[in-house]
Image (tube, grey):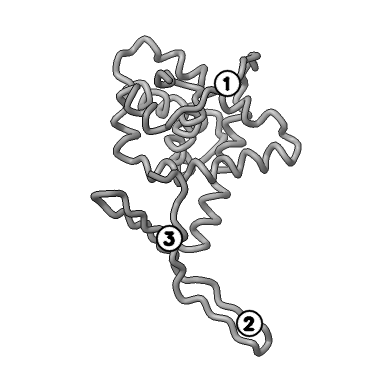
């Protein structure tokens, strides 16, 4: 399975030569065919731009949470994200893999933007916040329960500190998945 989406189908794009007027696509069909099922996610350019903006806002809020940064040795061993999901027996991510992978690339882009615009430790801060929450719940045996508790705690912290709205916290699960996919929480499968 490819980690990268197929080229989306864009409908109703028009351009006229007179006055150089353009119409923007009215919808984007991000269909993904995966062996036995097709996932259709219809959206609009405006919704995609709004999603990107909300994700950047919530990333900024998370990295603004107070946390002590720790020095970590980078793990450069390659791994397969789906293999890591299976190895850790996480059904929550297995069922919605394509959904989370779609947000993973937006999060990467938003973190790069933050780092390019002066917040050079954005990724490190994000990883530290999520890792600290993960370690609080590490004694539980069920990985899906750990993830749900992490999501609940992070949402609660963001709302309690008046950092984000109730609507924006809907992207917290995707941000935790991003940290998981970057191998900062849970065990990496054996090579």
* Foreground residue among 129 and 7: 7
First in sequence: mark 3 vs mark 1: 3
**Residue appearing at x 41%, y 29% in the figure:** 151
Q: Position of residue 72 (x, y in %)?
A: 62, 15
First in sequence: mark 2 vs mark 3: 2
Going by the image, does 119 lie left or right of 105? right
Q: Which residue is mark 2?
A: 21
Q: Position of residue 27 (x, y in %)?
A: 44, 67
Q: Which residue is mark 1?
A: 128
Check disc 3 and report its element: helix, strand or loop: strand
Q: Are marks 3 and 1 in contact (CB under 8 Å)?
A: no
Furthest residue toward bottom: 18
**Residue appearing at x 67%, y 83% in the figure:** 20
First in sequence: mark 1 vs mark 2: 2
Q: Residues within 10 Å of mark 2 (few under 14, many from 20)?
A: few
Q: CA distance from mark 2 to mark 3?
A: 23 Å
Q: Which residue is mark 3?
A: 43
Q: Quadrant of residue 149?
A: top left
Going by the image, does 152 lie left or right of 104? left
Q: Tell me the quarter of the image containing the N terminus.
A: top left
**Residue appearing at x 46%, y 28% in the figure:** 79
Q: CA distance from mark 3 to mark 1?
A: 33 Å
**Residue appearing at x 58%, y 49% in the figure:** 53
């Amino acid at each position: 399975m490819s980690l990268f989406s197929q080229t989306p189908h864009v409908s109703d794009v028009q351009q006229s030569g007179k006055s150089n007027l353009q119409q923007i696509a009215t919808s984007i069909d991000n269909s993904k065919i995966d062996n036995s099922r097709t996932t259709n996610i219809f959206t609009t350019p405006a919704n995609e731009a709004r999603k990107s903006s909300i994700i950047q806002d919530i990333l900024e809020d998370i990295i603004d949470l107070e946390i002590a940064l720790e020095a970590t040795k980078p793990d450069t061993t390659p791994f397969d994200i789906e293999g890591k999901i299976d190895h850790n027996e996480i059904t929550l991510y297995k069922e919605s893999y394509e959904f989370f992978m779609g947000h993973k690339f937006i999060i990467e882009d938003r973190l790069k933007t933050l780092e390019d615009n002066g917040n050079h430790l954005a990724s490190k801060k994000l990883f530290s916040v999520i890792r600290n929450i993960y370690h609080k719940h590490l004694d539980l045996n069920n990985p899906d329960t750990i993830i749900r508790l992490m999501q609940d705690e992070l949402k609660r912290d963001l709302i309690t500190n008046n950092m984000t709205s109730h609507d924006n916290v809907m992207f917290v699960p995707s941000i935790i998945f991003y940290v998981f996919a970057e191998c900062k929480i849970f065990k990496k499968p054996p090579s």
